[in-house]
């Protein structure tokens, strides 16, 4: 029994440290979610324009693509609001880039203008770090597997700790000792 106590104590200590990290990052993530829910929503300004029929937009996009990409097959086609009005978002087969076409002028739009990625603030970077710490995502799939292994180890340690406590409790009851834990 002494051997199992020693191993149980050291494995439990290591697992407890990792569990504290998971708990603290979980608290941070929950507080962050509550703060997001209580903050007012930011709605981008809407610019009114004359309506254009979707069929007309598709024909216009096809004509624009015919000038620069005659033999290319369209893999995906979507219409959405752009910085200056409606725009077509086109992915061609065999090309890694997405093409953004302004439907008003017929010109290509730079990807940084059409689909801007906002600058991430310090708190957003901290939140990403907390999520990676919480899910062990810093080391990729191996970290997620380690997280699963840790949860299994914690379940086994909990069950074995309860079993060892129950054995000691029975032994102490036989010897008329009233303490709950070992000396």
Image (cartoon, grey):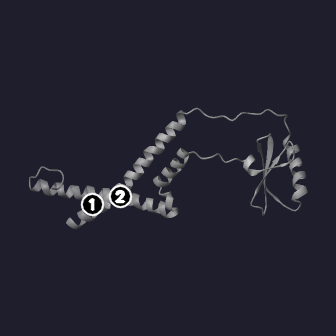
Provide the secondary structure element on which disc 1 rests: helix
Left or right of 62, for residue 147? left
Left or right of 111, for residue 134? left
- Residue 28's spot in the image, x, y percent? 45, 44
Circle 2 Cα neighbour tier, 10 Å, few/some/many (<14 / 14–19 / ≥20): some
- Residue 144's spot in the image, x, y percent? 48, 60
Q: In which quarter of the image is the C terminus?
A: bottom left
Give the residue number, with chain letter if any, for mark 2: 15
The quarter holding residue 97 reads bottom right
Which residue is situated farthest in the bottom direction here? 3
The span from disc 1 to disc 2 (Cα, nearest Å) is 10 Å
Give the residue number, with chain letter if any, for mark 1: 9
Closest to the observer, 127 or 9: 127
The quarter holding residue 174 reads bottom left
Closest to the observer, 151 or 38: 38
Is any part of residue 47 visible from this angle?
yes
Provide the secondary structure element on which disc 2 rests: helix
Q: Is residue 105 above or below residue 94?
A: above
Residue depicted at 48% across the width and 61% down the height? 143
Q: In which quarter of the image is the N terminus?
A: bottom left
Left or right of 22, for residue 33? right
Residue depicted at 23% across the width and 67% down the height? 3
Q: Which of marks 1 and 2 is nearer the N terminus?
A: 1
């Amino acid at each position: 029994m002494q051997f199992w106590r020693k191993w149980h104590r050291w494995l439990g200590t290591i697992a407890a440290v990792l569990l504290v990290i998971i708990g603290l990052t979980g608290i941070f993530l929950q507080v962050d979610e509550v703060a997001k829910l209580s903050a007012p929503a930011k709605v981008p300004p809407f610019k009114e324009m004359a309506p254009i029929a979707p069929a007309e937009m598709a024909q216009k996009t096809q004509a624009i693509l015919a000038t620069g990409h005659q033999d290319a097959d369209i893999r995906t086609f979507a219409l959405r609001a752009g910085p200056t009005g409606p725009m077509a978002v086109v992915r061609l087969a065999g090309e890694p880039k997405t093409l953004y076409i302004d439907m008003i002028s017929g010109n290509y739009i730079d990807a940084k203008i059409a689909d801007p990625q906002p600058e991430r603030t310090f708190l957003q970077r901290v939140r990403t770090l907390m999520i990676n710490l919480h899910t062990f995502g810093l080391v990729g799939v191996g970290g997620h597997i380690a997280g699963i292994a840790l949860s299994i180890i914690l379940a086994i340690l909990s069950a074995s700790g309860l079993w060892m406590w129950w054995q000691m409790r029975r032994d102490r009851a036989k010897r008329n000792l009233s303490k709950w834990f070992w000396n």
